[in-house]
Amino acid sequence: MISKYIEILDPTDKAEKKDKQTSSGVVDLNGKVIGLVDNGKPYYDIFLARLKELLCHRFKFAGIIHIRKDEMDTGAPLNAADREKLVTNFNIVLNGICD
């Protein structure tokens, strides 16, 4: 039997504070491989192209790889192959939302 329920969130409740470990960051972008994740929204590719141009004037990257999501920002995750690329090939990943 399938049970259906609705989760109700109370916006007046105090948020639970959790300690999260964050990345130590990257001190120098020179020699790094960066990944640009395109959410597929209109004109986001133009924004990323300009961002890439500006970054390349300032840093000497070992590589820049542009990944475009299969579905326009529906909240869908990247496909397995692209997720694997991010994990194994990049030092830095830039992901954003553009409307």
Image: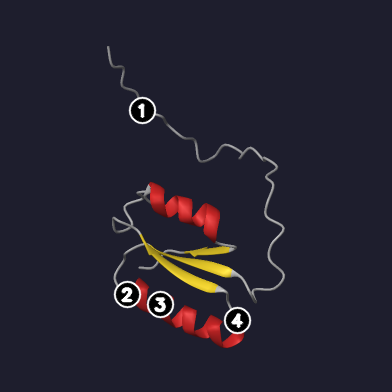
Q: Quick one: 70 or 40, which is closer to the camera?
A: 70
Q: Nearer the viewer, mark 4 or mark 1?
A: 4
Q: Which residue is mark 3?
A: 47
* Mark closer to the observer (2, 4): 4
Q: Quadrant of residue 25?
A: bottom right
Cα separation, mark 3 vs mark 1, equals 39 Å
Question: Dot 4, how many residues are within 10 Å of its Cα: few (below 14), some (14-19), or many (20+)?
Answer: few
Q: Are marks 2 and 3 in contact (CB under 8 Å)?
A: yes
Number of the label disc, if any, that sits on residue 90: none
Instruction: Tell me the tag on residue 6.
Output: 1
- Image x and y of residue 68, in percent: 35, 63
Residue 23, quarter of picture: bottom right
Q: Earlier in the sequence, mark 3 or mark 1?
A: 1
Assign a secondary structure to mark 4.
loop
Dot 3: element: helix
Q: Is residue 30 above or below residue 40?
A: below
On residue 43, the disc is 2
* Cα gap from disc 4 to disc 1, whole angstroms: 51 Å
Q: Residue furthest top?
A: 1
Q: Compute the Cα span from label 2 to label 1.
A: 37 Å
Residue 77 visible: no
Q: Residue at x 36, y 72 (%)?
A: 44
Mark 3 → mark 4, Cα distance in angstroms: 20 Å
Q: Quadrant of the N terminus?
A: top left
Q: Is 13 displayed left or right of 79 in the figure? A: right
Residue 58 is left or right of residue 78, and the answer is right
Q: Amino acid at mark 1?
A: Ile
Q: In the picture provided, is 31 more to the left or to the right than 51?
A: right
Q: Is residue 22 left or right of residue 51?
A: right
Which of the marked residues, 4 or 1, is nearer the chain's N terminus?
1
Instruction: Say which amino acid is labelled 2.
Output: Tyr
Colour mapping used in the image? secondary structure
